[in-house]
Image (cartoon, rainbow, N blue to C red):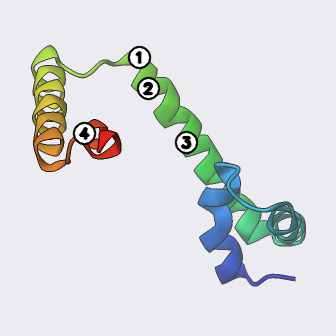
Amino acid sequence: MITCTSCVQALYPYIDRELSEEDIVQVRQHLDDCPGCLHMFQFQEYLGRIVRVRCREQLAPDSLRARIMASFQTERMRREVRRPDRRRVSAE
């Protein structure tokens, strides 16, 4: 049986389905036996649902999206300059 501290630390990975089957069983068992941790889990799950819904309803402003895309392009070009040409290396 896991402790409340371990359970709380595992809640996000549990919600995101990132735990092993064994860990899922342990967290689920603890949640079944511990009303406090169950309440925290239910709150986190509810909060995640609200955030997902709200993020779908509201888009980022065009100016912000343009800055983000420009940053992606700048980073892509910076990486291409730093990366050796792999085709040339494999042809030698």
Q: Earlier in the sequence, mark 3 or mark 2?
A: 3
Instruction: Name the residue carrying label 2.
Output: 54
Whole-percent x, y for residue 28 in the image: 85, 62
- Seen from the viewer's position, the closer of residues 48 and 18 is 18
Count residues near mark 3 (Cα–Cα under 10 Å), then give few for <14, some for 14-19, many for 20+: some
* Amino acid type at mark 4: Arg
Q: Earlier in the sequence, mark 1 or mark 3?
A: 3
* Amino acid type at mark 1: Glu
* Amino acid type at mark 2: Arg
Q: Residue at the location (89% across, 71% down)?
A: 33
Q: What is the secondary structure assignment of the residue under circle 4?
A: helix
Looking at the image, residue 12 lies above or below residue 84: below
Mark 4–mark 1 CB contact (< 8 Å): no
Which one is in front in this view, the residue at disc 4 or the one at disc 1? 4
Looking at the image, residue 89 lies above or below residue 55: below
Q: Residue at the location (41% across, 26% down)?
A: 55
Instruction: Name the residue carrying label 4.
Output: 88
- Seen from the viewer's position, the closer of residues 16 and 47 is 16
Cα–Cα span, label 3 and label 2: 10 Å
Q: Residue at the location (72% across, 68% down)?
A: 37
Q: Which mark is residue 48?
A: 3
Cα–Cα span, label 1 and label 3: 14 Å
